[in-house]
Image: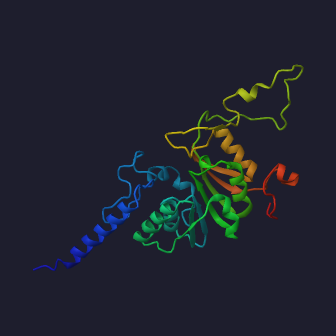
Amino acid sequence: MADMRPQRRRSEAAGDLQERVSDLAPWFQNIDIGHGITTAPDHFLGDYPAFKYRRFKDALPADLSGKSVLDIGCNAGFYAIEMKKRGAARVLGIDSDERYLDQARLASAALGFGDIEFAKRDVYDVAALGETFDLVIFMGVLYHLRHPLLALDLIREHVAGDMLLFQTMQQGSDAVLEVPQDHPFHKPGTFDPPDYFDDPAYPKLHFIEREFAHDWTNWWAPNAACSQAMLRAAGFAIEAQPEPEVYLCRTAPVPYREHGPAAVYPAKGARA
């Protein structure tokens, strides 16, 4: 008679894992953690974020051997895990929500990536990490922040060593207007304001005073021109835009740094 004990142990392990997944519900990231278990099989967006990742994953280096990665707002650790699969030497995920961090620890351990580090911090605390990372992932966070440009400044100032993978919800036009270097008060020869402020392609950061999609944490929705302008203003050069809301950037000199905190905050570091 065949020994059924290994099969029974696997079944028990799967049952225990499913129970732990259920205890940490709800999950915003649907992650396949093996044993036929996915963390959010009924996600309202479908197989999220895997389907989104497939659209832009080829824009990232296939081999991250020897590289360090910081995932800001890591949620359940989907992107941290994917970067570890690419061979990253060190991956740190931070989030301000302890339940998300518990989800991330469970998912990464279940998949054999227990060496991924997770810590409770928010984006305004990144200076306390005291180190830079070869790749910073900052996806799905900016529009939840009351101070979005400050967050980008702090990332550039303190933790971005080379690459930034950035994503934000965008609303409005996808067109991008070439704006003047200096904005006059009026049209030449008139007292009328310039027309470009009313152009849908002008950089606009829409403020959401109340809920968006039944979520009170959604504060801002830039259009495409605004996302790109904010990245440049914080000191990031856009190298690729593999899909409308996703930008792969490299660190670049911070514009107007010499003007001090009126132009860029905190403007404390020596890195350009």
Residue at 31% of width from left, 66% of height from top? Answer: 35
Q: In this view, does 250 lie above or below 19?
A: above
Name the image colouring: rainbow
Is residue 159 visible to the viewer in this orientation of the structure?
A: no
**Residue 199 visible in rendering:** yes
Looking at the rendered image, the quarter that the N terminus falls into is bottom left
User: Does residue 130 appear left or right of residue 114 in this picture?
Assistant: right
Residue 133 in the image, given as x and y percentages of width and height: 65, 67
x and y percent of residue 200 in the render?
A: 66, 29
> Splitting the image into 4 quarters, where does residue 65 fall?
bottom right
State the image coordinates of residue 91 (x, y, percent, origin top left): 56, 69
Q: Is residue 50 left or right of residue 38?
A: right
- Most extreme residue toward the top, as rendered? 190
Q: Name the quarter where the C terminus is drawn.
A: bottom right
- In the displayed structure, does residue 82 sit left or right of residue 271? left
* 268 vs 135, nearest the viewer: 268
Taking the image as shown, residue 69 lies to the left or right of residue 11, namely right
The one nearer the camera, 4 or 99, is: 99
Does residue 65 lie above or below 272 as drawn? below
Name the residue at the right extreme: 189
Q: Name the spot of residue 251 as percent of width and height, x first.
A: 72, 58
